[in-house]
Image (tube, rainbow, N blue to C red):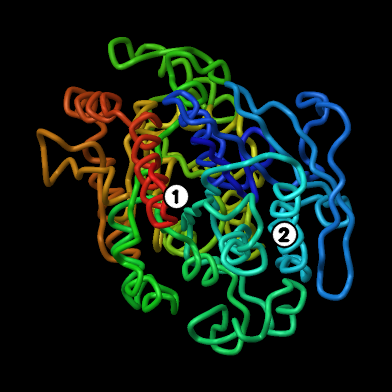
């Protein structure tokens, strides 16, 4: 089977969040189980040309956008582990400092940019000679590909028996644009209906993927159920409920080559569940990185986009309370200006307790996962979450809200003393969050209990191979829907 994984960000080329980790690791895991998987993404300015040399001249493409054609090319490089990476190039669209927008908002031409990407993928396949059994698309930036498969490109030979899988990583970001962007896509107004891409008078690209893809998936079983409800469906719960028989939940794996404390070269010392001594060295190294003294005060870490979805409004609400506890807090991330400013203000007011680094810094993220004692994820919603999985792998105890993949992967240590791997709160509420943090802080001094929680988390298997086999079954279902045997 030949699979092309399409995404707006893919590790190791471009990353703002967990989407890139997933779409970077999945093709490699698929290769390991015998699937010939490639990946494709935009050729952003941030792609390291020295680290990823291009293989010969790219293939020129001309992409119809409304009443004009836009020139571009598709370049090839090596993603590692036998995976070929293809990069859709147009410097006017993708040669920018950021992937989607600045701190003050999204780029106003994002519909045009990612329409170019989606249709560029189709034009490249049409003219390159490459053939795929499955196009695996991810989030709204690639959602037009399944639409094109069933409309503008349906009669073209390379696509007649190709199946599509569309994975929702975060339903909160849907690619909503004004209706006058529809002509850019080349699609007709007959698709601008409640049964198509129309959404309360706007163009909804995510909805296109949900309606037109052969098979749908999300990144945890709980989230697949949650998004069929008004609370988490963001207006698309009816579409998802209607397609519930084609909707599956698969928890993300993690790349053990990138995220394993026994082999991680980004951290101060390597360690394992059998020998945790290296974690103490990582702890001292992290404290020194942020100018804190090397003592036994517990350290709480947070990494991620500074947005309400990630719970930073709750963090802001309990910031003063946190500063009064016997704990140090280290935060790494970037996002909405108001949360960046709020976190920086906390760091300024309580420099001996709270440290903030506004950045996307993968190397520092590894240091934080290895060096902190507990990790906070107070998410409003969390389709899967990766950092709670990284945390458990690195012997760091997660404190999470019971939503989406967090509910599927973490067991509360007070509710289940023999099987607990973290601490959970349920209501999206500052007092409930305080209670979970307090329970974690109370458990920390009990070293035998704490180390038992740590080792249980480290023993869990979140390898990508298991998830890759589940995706393979989805691909086979998609092919059956297209009238082919998997």
Q: Is residue 29 visible?
A: yes
Q: Nearer the viewer, mark 1 or mark 2?
A: 2
Q: Which residue lies under the disc numbered 2?
A: 119
Determine if residue 327 is in view. no
- Give the quadrant of residue 413: top left
Quadrant housing the C terminus = top left
Is residue 329 shown above or below 85?
below
Residue at screen point 59% across, 70% down: 205
Q: Earlier in the sequence, mark 1 or mark 2?
A: 2
At x 43% / y 76%, what residue is drawn? 236
224 or 341, which lies in front? Answer: 224
Which image quarter: residue 153? bottom right
The residue depicted at 48 percent of the width and 82 percent of the height is 195
The local secondary structure at tag 1 comes to helix
Q: Residues within 10 Å of mark 2 (few under 14, many from 20)?
A: many
Label tally? 2
Label 2 residue SS: helix
User: Please, is residue 452 above or below residue 68 in the view?
Assistant: above
The reply, left or right, for residue 78 in relation to residue 49 is left
Residue 249 location in percent, x, y?
A: 33, 52
Q: Position of residue 135 (x, y in %)?
A: 55, 49
Q: Residue furthest bottom?
A: 201
Q: Is residue 484 left or right of residue 335?
A: left
Picture quarter containing residue 15? top right
Q: Tag on residue 296?
A: none
Q: Position of residue 371 (x, y in %)?
A: 46, 27
Residue with the mark numbered 1? 323
- Observer-nearest residue: 385 or 160? 160
Residues packed near mark 1 inside 10 Å, few (<14), some (14 to 19) or many (20 plus): some
Q: Nearer the viewer, residue 101 or 291?
A: 101
Please report the residue visible at 56 percent of the width from the left and 36 percent of the height from the top: 24
Between residue 49 and residue 465, name the one nearer to us: 465
């Amino acid at each position: 089977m030949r699979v092309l994984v399409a995404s707006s960000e893919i590790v190791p080329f471009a990353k703002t969040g967990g989407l890139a980790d997933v779409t970077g690791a999945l093709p490699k895991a698929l290769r390991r189980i015998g699937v010939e998987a490639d990946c494709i993404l935009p050729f952003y300015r941030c792609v390291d040309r020295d680290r990823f040399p291009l293989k010969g001249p790219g293939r020129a493409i001309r992409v119809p956008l409304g009443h004009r054609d836009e020139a571009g090319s598709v370049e090839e490089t090596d993603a590692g582990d036998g995976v070929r990476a293809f990069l859709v190039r147009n410097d006017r669209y993708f040669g920018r400092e950021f992937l989607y927008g600045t701190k003050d908002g999204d780029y106003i031409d994002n519909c045009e940019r990612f329409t170019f990407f989606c249709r560029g993928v189709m034009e490249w396949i049409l003219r390159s000679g490459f053939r795929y059994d499955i196009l695996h698309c991810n989030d709204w930036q690639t959602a037009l590909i399944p639409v094109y498969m069933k409309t503008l490109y349906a009669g073209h030979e390379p696509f007649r028996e190709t199946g599509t899988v569309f994975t929702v990583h975060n339903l909160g970001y849907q690619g909503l644009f004004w209706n006058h962007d529809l002509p850019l896509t080349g699609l007709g107004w007959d698709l601008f209906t409640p049964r198509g891409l129309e959404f309360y008078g706007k163009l909804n690209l995510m909805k296109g993927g949900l309606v037109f893809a052969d098979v749908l998936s999300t990144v945890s079983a709980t989230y697949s159920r949650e998004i069929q409800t008004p609370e988490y469906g963001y207006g698309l719960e009816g579409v998802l409920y209607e397609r519930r028989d084609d909707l599956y939940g698969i928890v993300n794996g993690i790349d053990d080559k990138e995220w394993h404390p026994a082999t991680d070269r980004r951290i101060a010392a390597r360690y394992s569940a059998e020998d945790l001594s290296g974690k103490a060295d990582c702890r001292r190294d992290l404290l020194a990185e942020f100018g804190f003294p090397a003592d036994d005060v517990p350290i709480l870490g947070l990494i991620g986009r500074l947005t309400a979805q990630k719970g930073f409004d709750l963090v802001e609400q309990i910031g003063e309370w946190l500063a009064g506890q016997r704990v140090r807090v280290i935060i790494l991330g970037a996002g909405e200006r108001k949360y960046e400013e709020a976190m920086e203000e906390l760091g300024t007011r309580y420099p001996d307790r709270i440290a903030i680094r506004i950045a996307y810094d993968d190397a520092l993220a590894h240091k934080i996962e290895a060096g902190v004692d507990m990790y906070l994820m107070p998410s409003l919603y969390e389709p899967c979450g990766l950092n709670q999985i990284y945390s458990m792998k690195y012997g760091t105890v997660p404190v999470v809200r019971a939503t989406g993949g967090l509910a599927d992967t973490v067991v509360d240590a007070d509710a289940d003393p023999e099987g607990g791997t973290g601490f959970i709160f349920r209501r999206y509420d500052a007092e409930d969050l305080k209670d979970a943090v307090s329970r974690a802080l109370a458990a920390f001094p009990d070293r035998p209990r704490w180390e038992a929680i740590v080792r249980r988390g480290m023993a869990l298997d979140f390898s990508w191979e298991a998830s890759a086999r589940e995706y393979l079954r989805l691909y086979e279902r998609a092919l059956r829907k297209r009238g082919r045997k998997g």
